[in-house]
Amino acid sequence: MRLVGRLVVTLLSLVVLAAALYGGVRAFEWLQSRDAFGLLAREPVQPVQLTTLDPYTRKVAGRAWFGNYFTTMVFDAGSTSATRPRIVAKWERKTVTVDLLNDGGPGVQSYLRLLLRRLDRLQSQVDFRLGNTDPLITVQFLEHGAYVRQNGADSVGNTRTRFYQGPPGLIRARISVDVGVQDTPDEMRSTLIHELTHAIGASGHFLSASDRRHSVMYKANTLTNWSQNDAAVIRILYSPFIRSGMSEAAARAGLRKYARAGK
Ligand SMILES: [Zn+2]
């Protein structure tokens, strides 16, 4: 009998212990759930986006040569304060829809969609997407004659932007491409990526032949993807450290802040 009694007591204690453990775990789970007033919330309400800071971008952000690369790409060297101010003009809204107004040939639409997806991976401020509902960036393919009448004969692609000299920055971009002079799919792609990069706020060009293989913003671009430095420029342009309306000096200060962020 005593043995049976001890067994019953042991079993009962085990049941009580299991129940206590179960209750404890449930309580802990409840504390971590959303309706538990955030008692154990481990994330701040507005997480600082330091995780999106790319190590390469942070490494180069503070370097002088990259400061020159950034300002060459973002600011239009041809504009002066007399014509147009040299300021940052970027998209400052949640979504920017890009619309192909007409058929650019086989593979063009999927290439553009790929580029927009890459842009979304590079930054998290703006969701760039392909569509035709309230498009803010439009792409139109023109026959050679029509293109020349509209933009002259000294280019193969053109981007016209409208923007405020401060928030909300860019409000409209129209890309036109001369289809008559794009001999290969790669030429079409390199024209498109160059113009799209203008359309998101890079107004400048690299003019030296030594930059030919280094940036899509080389004047006569042949690249079909952003270089590592181009990607770094886009990351920083669409970071909290750069805002529409910034002067070149303010943008350089923003670069230094990016370099220090998260250290
Ligand atoms: Zn250009």
Image (spheres, rainbow, N blue to C red):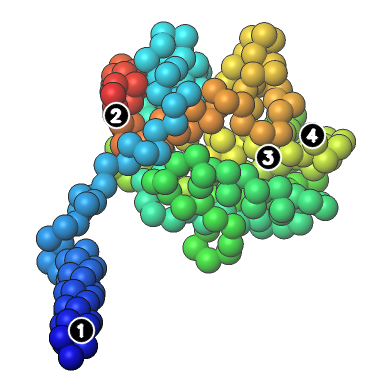
Q: CA distance from mark 3 to mark 4?
A: 9 Å
Q: Residue at x 71, y 34 (%)?
A: 224
Q: Nearer the viewer, residue 263 or 97?
A: 263
Q: Which residue is mark 1?
A: 3
**Where residue 68 appears, x then y in whole percent?**
46, 12
Specify the label residue 187 is tagged with.
Answer: 4
Q: Looking at mark 3, is its residue's CB closer than 8 Å to ligand 1?
A: no
The amino acid type of the residue labelled 3 equals: Leu
The answer to which of marks 3 and 4 sits earlier in the sequence is 4
Of helix, strand and loop, which one carries label 4? helix
The answer to which of marks 2 and 4 sits earlier in the sequence is 4
The amino acid type of the residue labelled 1 equals: Leu
The answer to which of marks 1 and 3 sits earlier in the sequence is 1
Q: Is residue 241 left or right of residue 64?
A: left
Q: Is residue 181 left or right of residue 22?
A: right
Question: In the image, which is nearer the foreground, mark 1 or mark 2?
Answer: 1
**107 up-or-down from 38: above or below:** above
Q: Which residue is mark 2?
A: 262
